[in-house]
Image (cartoon, helix red, strand yellow):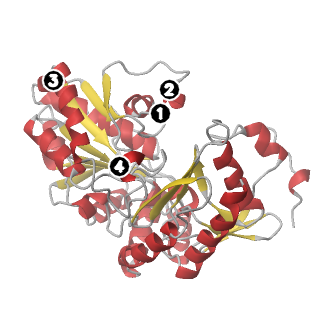
Amino acid sequence: MSNVKSQNLEHLWMPFSANRDFKENPRLMNEGRGMFYKKTDGMSVLDGTSGLWCCNAGHNRSHIVNAIQNQASKLDYAPSFQMGHSLGFKAAEKLLEFAPSKDFQYVFFTNSGSESVDTALKIALGYQQHRGKKDKKILVGRDRAYHGVGFGGISVGGLPMNKKHFSLLSNVDHICNTHNLEHNAFSKGQPTWGEEMANDLLRIIEKYGAEKIAAFITEPIAGSTGVLIPPIGYLERIRRICTDNDILLIFDEVITGFGRLGSPFASQYFNVIPDMITCAKGLTSGTVPMGAVMIKKEIYDSFQAGDSKMIDLFHGYTYSAHPLAAAALIATLEVYDGEGLFERANGLAGYFEDKLHSLKGLDYLIDIRNLGLVGAIEMLPRNKKIGARGYDVFQTAFHDENILIRFTGDTIALSPPLIVEKSHIDQIVESLRNIIPNN
């Protein structure tokens, strides 16, 4: 077994991490299988977060691993500019089998959710230009939204700390978020209050004029900002407003895609069809970095009117449709489908909800919210120091209870792999029942 303290941890600048504190008290994983990681000392850790919202099929699934290994031995890389390989096209076709509408006929592959968002925003702006709507340049997001860390995603996102040190896009505005503890605390599933919050998009339309707004982007459920569940009717209202005002609607489904709500995408769960869908994370169950944008035919066709031998979209990535990622995508979707994992998640959602809400009444706990196999437990800040209690609960869960949870501020977020058993849910909830009142 490895001694953590003997390892040199100095030279890696870790993302979204308290680097100095981590290196004093490391949390290192060494293996993963099924529902569990293993620490470097061999101790098992129950994964309550699907890694980082991504390992929806669990860890080290043989069908996916074998597909990656076989592909690596056959074709390790092929260029994606003016060239291709057959598996990339097969991967796009496979992904579209899970799309919410037959109108989605094209896929643009990226390497992450951040790249998917920036790609979708570029395509939205290009689409408006190609159809002669040259004034449609404004992009609209929501407060307290997370759309990755590209300059476009940060700009339409609504997290002040992510924007603090960077110069961002100027053609951006935001509507309000839907989080309201006064009306919706301890809601089970979708809150009944708040559909009218969608009308804040009308304020932005009145401010600029619909003729100047290219697209509105939203997460169906805001995950990384604290699991904000949309009120009943909210997304439907957003769709109507966008349609009535000729504004593209982009769903950021990087977190909600691939079974988190018991359906392929949140679009199917809510029965709201956007114009583009960004995805990543569960796309390959976290095995190989990959993202994608699913695009309606009308949008793709608008870029095809020029000379057929000229580049139609001046955008792309060296590793778009990488052969190993394409193999991982196909195998992952086969696992989801073959094992009925989306249906399984749907069947466990009620049990997950009941167990989470059994924590109501604990000291410091001010809200519980959930939908599908995603949940949040919000706690009071300690001495007005936002995030201190959340960080300590996270640390205690890992070191003392051997459970991996996620925190954002003082909200604990849970999103276990779709292979989770009721006993795993029990273990997570009972551990939090012990931890929260003591932090």
Q: Please state which amino acid type lies under the numbered disc 4.
A: His
Find residue 175 and report its horizontal and vertical position in percent.
Answer: 30, 32
Badge 3 is on which residue? 206
Instruction: Tell me the SS state at disc 2.
Output: helix
Is tag 4's residue or tag 1's residue first in the polypeptide sequence?
1
Badge 1 is on which residue? 159
Between marks 2 and 1, how big is the CA–CA gap? 7 Å
Please name which of the two marks, 4 or 2, marks the residue nearer to the observer: 4
Find residue 6 and report its horizontal and vertical position in percent.
Answer: 91, 52
Q: Please state which amino acid type lies under the numbered disc 3.
A: Glu
Find residue 337 and report its horizontal and vertical position in percent.
Answer: 36, 76
Compared with residue 355, is residue 383 higher up or lower down, i.e. above or below?
Answer: above
Between marks 4 and 1, how big is the CA–CA gap? 23 Å
Labels 2 and 1 touching (C-beta < 8 A)? yes
Badge 2 is on which residue? 163
Is tag 3's residue or tag 4's residue first in the polypeptide sequence?
4
Q: Residues within 10 Å of mark 2 (few under 14, many from 20)?
A: some
Q: Which residue sits at x=56%, y=21%?
A: 165
Q: Please state which amino acid type lies under the numbered disc 1.
A: Leu
Between marks 2 and 3, how big is the CA–CA gap? 26 Å
Please name which of the two marks, 4 or 1, marks the residue nearer to the observer: 4
Badge 4 is on which residue? 183
